Amino acid sequence: MPEQQHLKDHYQEARIFARRMVVAALAIVMLLGVLLARLYNLQVVNYQDYVTQSDRNRVQVQPLPPTRGLIYDRQGRLLADNRPSYNLTLIKEQITDLPATLELLGQLVDLKEGDVEEFEKRLKQRRRPFEAVPLSYRLTEEEIARLAVNEYRLPGVKVSAQLVRDYPMKSLLAHTVGYVGRINDRELAAFDEQEYRLYSGTHTVGKVGLEREYESTLLGEVGYQYVETNARGRVLRVLESIAPVPGKNLQLYLDIDIQREAIEALGDYRGAVVALDVKTGGVLAMASTPSYDPNLFVTGISYKDYRALNESLDLPLYNRAIQGQYPPGSTVKPMLGLAALHNGVVTPESFVRDPGFYQIEGEKRLYRDWKRQGHGRHVDLLQAVTESCDTYFYDTAYRMGIDAIHEFGSHFALGERTGIDIPSERRGIWPSKQWKREARGRAWYPGDTVNVGIGQGAVLTTPLQMAAMTATIASRGRFIEPHLVHTMGEEKVPSSINELSTVSQKNWDFIFATMKNVVHGVRGTAKSISTGLTYHMAGKTGTAQVVGIAQGEKYDSEALLERQRDHALFVAFAPVEDPKIAVAVIVENGEKSSKAARVARRVIDRYLAIEAELELKQELKQEVTGQAATVGRLVNTPTAPAPINPRRSYPGSQGQQDT
């Protein structure tokens, strides 16, 4: 019988099972070790990193934009305000399909031309994670309602309330106050870390005018809040908040009533008016026409509107008051007359013969007077200023020389920036030998000096410079740097002062008399505006050629295009006895200086009427205050008690009733 075979080896199975148990145990131990090592790495080694990442997913830092400072005129009327606006913003990190979302929003909201393009540009700019990017501004109530109904379809889309700049005076102050606009790529690229932090949460920056000059003052200090959000980005609670610091308010010297009068007086003409306070250098009015509505730029101007403004022949975006450079014409004659008196070139009694032209000895060229037949045989300085005799000033300038003329005129801010507190001021040209050599590479000729004598040739000035020159004359040589802003918050803005103290009071008095005669004299070139004047005004008319007229030819207005006709100018100050206001006016292609003179009179009339009204209000206020103080003293004065009448009964007394 064969040997019986064992079907199962229990010993072998036990050994295999034991080996497998050991391997499994070792595997479990190894895996457990890996798990423990990983836990150690997460909980100990990299704990802080993962906590930070977790907090970033859960906690977000949101900037709180400050409220921009307001701008007021000298009587406290609002010129630049902040108005609430509902804006459509998108958070890219919370949107799964951005193109589809934009397409849907285009069906729900009236997106203007270029809104999506601007949004995509801003999306590529440097920004914080989960920072909302604006797509459209100033949503209507109907649009807000449509977005609310479709909120479930629009993750990452928010309607946020925000303060946006508003200019209630619109075109009246566009060139002076300026405007804010969206921060563009060029400006953002120029920001340093500090500026980038300051502009977190805001999308606009001052572009022109006071808004740009005082940007750091008006902007304020950005605040922050730390918020906890859920997985969808919805804010659950505010963990910590740092409030923003609002910008400082500005109060100007400028008076909106005087500004409005200047604009209305210019009417449909292109031109500029600058009115200065002689005592302080404050700008009471600065008008440039035509103008534009600055509100168009605040949230982004359309291509159509900007093209219309930028391509207009009338240049509405151009601030003529500080950027327009014009030959001042005869308006510089009082200053040149004062220079000639001061340098001993002429005396009040000096005279010239005026046959209607002037000729430099040895030259054939004739320098024509505006009056073809001349002003007579004995023209002195009083008559020369009163009647604006060119020949007198040709001769005076030639004898004085360009060196003396340039040096004296420099004290009146000619050829230099006045230092006014708005950007883009141009310096004009007050020529000299050195200037011509450097600018044109040519020598200076006597004929150049003759042309400077009547404010022509190479001479160019801005309306602001003409006003500053006039104010300096009115204050007898005290040049005060023009300023628009009076106070920033509670802080007064200082102005520099330069005294021209070497000119004698006798010479100042004489120049005052010549300018007064321009308006009030029988033969004054501005006598047409003297009718009905209740105060004395000193002034000087002027015209400036736009195109050259050949020697011997007459100026023919009808033969010229409207934009080739002479500019009309006028400078003035009043009252002569105690000057308070100085005004410079240019009417482009206005031809007759009387047009500019009428504008100046309206501005000065308005200013003096306002001053009288303000003085009356102040007197009434002081009177009321004085009466109130008197009443208060009487009420608070202790009085002796009245004697008790024994025949009268008093409450609680047992006396006999009075009969």
Image (spheres, rainbow, N blue to C red):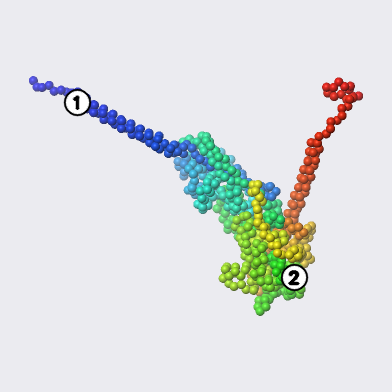
Q: Is the N terminus in the top left, top right, bottom left or bottom right quadrant?
A: top left
The residue where tag 1 is placed is 12
Q: Amino acid at mark 2?
A: Thr
Position in image of residue 71 (x %, y %): 64, 48
At mark 1, the secondary structure is helix
Position in image of residue 61 (x %, y %): 51, 40
Circle 2 or circle 1, nearest the eye: 2
Whether residue 113 is visible to the viewer of this picture, yes or no, is: no
The residue nearer to you, when weighing 88 against 82, is 82
Q: Residues within 10 Å of mark 2 (few under 14, many from 20)?
A: some
At mark 2, the secondary structure is loop
Q: Which mark is residue 347?
A: 2
Q: CA distance from mark 2 to mark 1?
A: 140 Å
Q: Is the C terminus in the top left, top right, bottom left or bottom right quadrant?
A: top right
Q: Amino acid at mark 1?
A: Gln
Question: As drawn, is 321 to the left or to the right of 191?
Answer: right
